[in-house]
Image (spheres, rainbow, N blue to C red):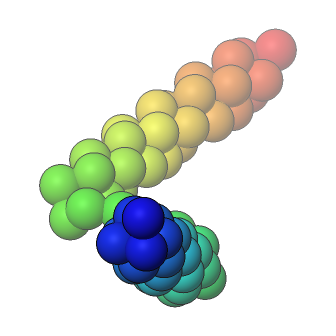
Amino acid sequence: MRVWYIIAGIAAAVAALLLIYTFVRDRRYMRKKPSEAMSHELWAEIEQERQESTVRREGFKRALDEADNKR
C-alpha cells in the first residue's frame, strides 16, 4: 500500500514541476515584444502589407489633390 502513496507523490511532484515549467515558459513568451514573438515570415508579410498600404494611401492623396485642384 505504501508503494501507491510513493507513486502518487512522485506523480504529483512531476505534475507540479510541469505546471511550473509551463508557467515560466509562457511568462517569458508573454513578456516579449510582438515583433520578437512573431515568426520572420509573418513579420515580412506585415511589412509588405504596410508598404502596399503606403503606396495606396499616397495614390489616394494624389488623386484627391488632383480632384481638388480641378475645381
> 62 and 30: which one is in front?
30
In the rendered image, which quarter contains the N terminus? bottom left
Percent across and percent down for residue 18 are: 42, 73
Could you tell me how many numbered marks the image carries?
0
Q: Residue at x 69, y 32 (%)?
A: 65
> 64 and 69: which one is in front?
64
Percent across and percent down for residue 69 are: 73, 27
**Image height of 32 relative to 44, above or below:** below
**Image height of 8 relative to 24, above or below:** above
Percent across and percent down for residue 58 are: 52, 42
User: Can residue 59 be seen in the rendering of this structure?
Assistant: yes
Q: Residue furthest left?
A: 41
> 15 and 10: which one is in front?
10
In the rendered image, which quarter contains the C terminus? top right
Q: Residue at x 46, y 39 (%)?
A: 53
Q: Residue at x 43, y 74 (%)?
A: 2
User: Can residue 26 be seen in the rendering of this structure?
Assistant: no
> 45 and 71: which one is in front?
45
39 sits left or right of 18 in the view? left
65 sits left or right of 54 in the view? right
Percent across and percent down for residue 57 are: 56, 37
4 sits left or right of 23 in the view? left
Q: Residue furthest front?
A: 1
